[in-house]
Image (tube, rainbow, N blue to C red):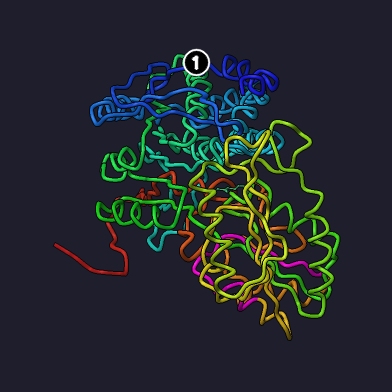
Amino acid sequence: MKMVVTDFGIDKALRTLGVKAINEGASTGSNYFSNGGIIESISPVDGSLIGKVKTTTKEDFETVMDVATKAFKVWRIVPAPQRGEIVRQFGEKLREKKEALGKLVSFEMGKSFQEGLGEVQEMIDICDFAVGLSRQLHGLTMHSERPGHRMYEQYHSLGVVGIISAFNFPVAVWSWNTALAWVCGDVTVWKPSEKVPLCGIACQNIAAEVFAENNLPEGISCLINGDYKVGEFMTKDSRIPLISATGSIRMGKIVAQEVASRLGKSLLELGGNNAIIVTPDADIKMTVIGAIFGAVGTAGQRCTSTRRLIIHESICDKVKLAIVDAYKQLRIGNPLDENNHIGPLIDKDAVKLYQHALKKVVEEGGNLIVEGGVLSGEGYESGCYVKPAIAEAKPDFEIVQHETFAPILYLLKYSGNVENAIDIQNNVVQGLSSAIMTNNLREAEQFLSVAGSDCGIANVNIGTSGAEIGGAFGGEKETGGGRESGSDAWKIYMRRQTNTINYTNELPLAQGIKFDL
Ligand code: UN1
C-alpha cells in the first residue's frame, strides 16, 4: 500500500497543499480550529488512510459565522474588479498547484489522474470567467413613465453563501460557487463531502494564502466539516441567504424544505438520469466514444454520467456490438496510473448499490450483455473496483428510472420517429443532461425544440458529461432547477435592486394616480 502512495507522489502532493496527518476542520481563512470528532479519509484507491480531519461543532460554526459576517462588511465594499483581481490570483495559485491538487483529487476520490487534472482545470477556467465577470455585473436601465425620472436596476452583494458539495467533484463545484460568489462580493462557508475532506482542506489553504497575501480579513472563505448535521447548521441559519447544494435528490428535498421554511434561496444541483438518443443517422464511431466516456468516466459517478442509451431499433445491433467490443479495451485499476481508464467507486457502500442495481435489472427482466462484477486480488484490495456493465432493459424498469452512481449503462430500444425516443428520454423524474447523436438536422432541431429534451443540458453529437464552465450548468424537474458556473448564473449570488430617481420639483405618482393635498 505504502508503495503506491510513494510511487505516485501523494506524500509530496499533500505537503505541497499543506494537508497534514490531522487537520482542524473549521476555518475562517488562515485560522483553523475544531472541537468535534474525527473523520478519517480513506483512499478508495488502495484502502489506505490518507489523513484525518476534525469536524465542526455548533460552537465552532458560531465562530465561523461571526467572522464571516464581519468579513462580508469589508469585502462587499471592495470594488468588484478588485475582487476579480483576488480571484485572478487564486486562479494563478491553482495553476501552480494543478498537479498536486489533481493528484489529491484522484487519490482521495478515485477518479483518473487525467480527470483530477480536468477538475482543477475547471477551477482555473471558472476563475478566468469570474475575473471578466467582475467588470460586468450589469443591471439594466429602463425608461420611467414619469417625466424627469430615471429608473435602473443594480446588483448588490448578497451576504454569506453556504456551499454543500458532493464527493464526486470534490473541488470544482466549490470553485464554481466561490469564484462567482467572491466577485459578487459575498463570503462563503463550505461543507465538503465527508468522503473527501482533505480536498476541502487543500482548497481552503490555497484560498487562505491569497486572502492573507492581500491583507484581506479572515472570513471571506470559510470551511466547516462533518456530516449532514453540520450541513443543517447552515440550512437552518437565517444569516445565510443562499444555500448552494450539490448531491442526491433525497438530500436536495430536505435542504430545499429547510431553506424555504425560512424563505432563503437555494441553488440545487441534484441527480441526473442522462440519456443519449442514437438515431439511424448517428455517426457510430462518435456515438461509441461519447457513450463510453459518459458511462464509465469517473466510474459512472458524475451527475452527468450517461445512464441510458436510447437506440433506434434499426441500428441497435450495430451499436451494441461496437460498444460491447470497445468495453473490452477498458482498463480498470489505480487511477493514478495513466494507463487505466477507470478507477474505483468511492466506497464499499457504492459497490453495494452497484451490485443491487445489477441484480435488480435482471430481476425486472433485463439482460446483462456486459456482466460487470466486483474485482479482487492484487491492485484491487480496497474492494471498491468494479467492472463496467451494460444491460438491455426497458425504459419503465424501476431501476432504470433510478440514478445509480456506478458504471452501468442501460440500452433501451425505440422504434418509429425521434419523438418516441424523446418521450422515453423525458419520462424520468430527473432532468439534468441529455444528448442526441444524429447527422439529421430535423431530428437534431426537434430534440432541441420546446417539444424536445426537457433537461437543463441538451447536446447534439456530444455525450452527456463534460460540460464547459461557460454555460449555465444545472437541470430541471427533480434535478432541482439550479444553475451554476457560466452565463448569467452569477445573478443568484446577488440581490437585485430597482431604483427610481426623481430629478424634478414635482412628485408625480405612477399609474397617473392623483393624490393632491
Ligand atoms: C457533477 O457531476 O456534479 O459536466 C458535475 C460535467 C462536469 C461537471 C459534473 N463538468 O460532467
| Residue 268 in view (yes/no) | yes
Residue stretch in magenta:
422-438
Pick the residue in front: 401 or 463. 401
Q: Which residue is depicted at the point 55% across and 76% down?
A: 396
Q: Position of residue 134 (x, y in %)?
A: 55, 36
Q: Which residue is depicted at the point 82% across and 55% down?
A: 326
Q: Position of residue 489 (x, y in %)?
A: 52, 49
Pick the residue in front: 442 or 306. 306
Specify the quadrant of the image occupied by residue 459.
bottom right
Pick the residue in front: 75 or 288. 288
Q: Identify the residue under disc 1.
A: 214
- Dividing the image into 4 quarters, which one contains the C terminus? bottom left
Task: Tell me if residue 473 comes above or below residue 335 in the rendering.
Answer: below
Query: Residue type at mark 1?
Result: Asn
Q: Which residue is depicted at the point 39% across and 19% down?
A: 217
Pick the residue in front: 59 or 265. 59
Q: Which residue is depicted at the point 49% across and 40% down?
A: 177
Left of 498 or right of it: where is 379?
A: right
Q: Position of residue 21 (x, y in %)?
A: 47, 17
Q: Secondary structure at mark 1?
A: loop
Left of 274 or right of it: where is 61?
A: left
Task: Tell me if residue 436 comes above or below residue 418 in the rendering.
Answer: above
Q: How many marks?
A: 1
- Dividing the image into 4 quarters, which one contains the N terminus? top right
- Is residue 7 on the magenta stretch? no
Q: Position of residue 138 (x, y in %)?
A: 52, 45
| Residue 121 in view (yes/no) | no
Task: Tell me if residue 9 comes above or below residue 378 in the rendering.
Answer: above
Left of 15 or right of it: where is 73?
A: left
Characterize the local packing of mark 1: few (<14), some (14-19) or many (20 or more) Cα atoms within 10 angstroms: few
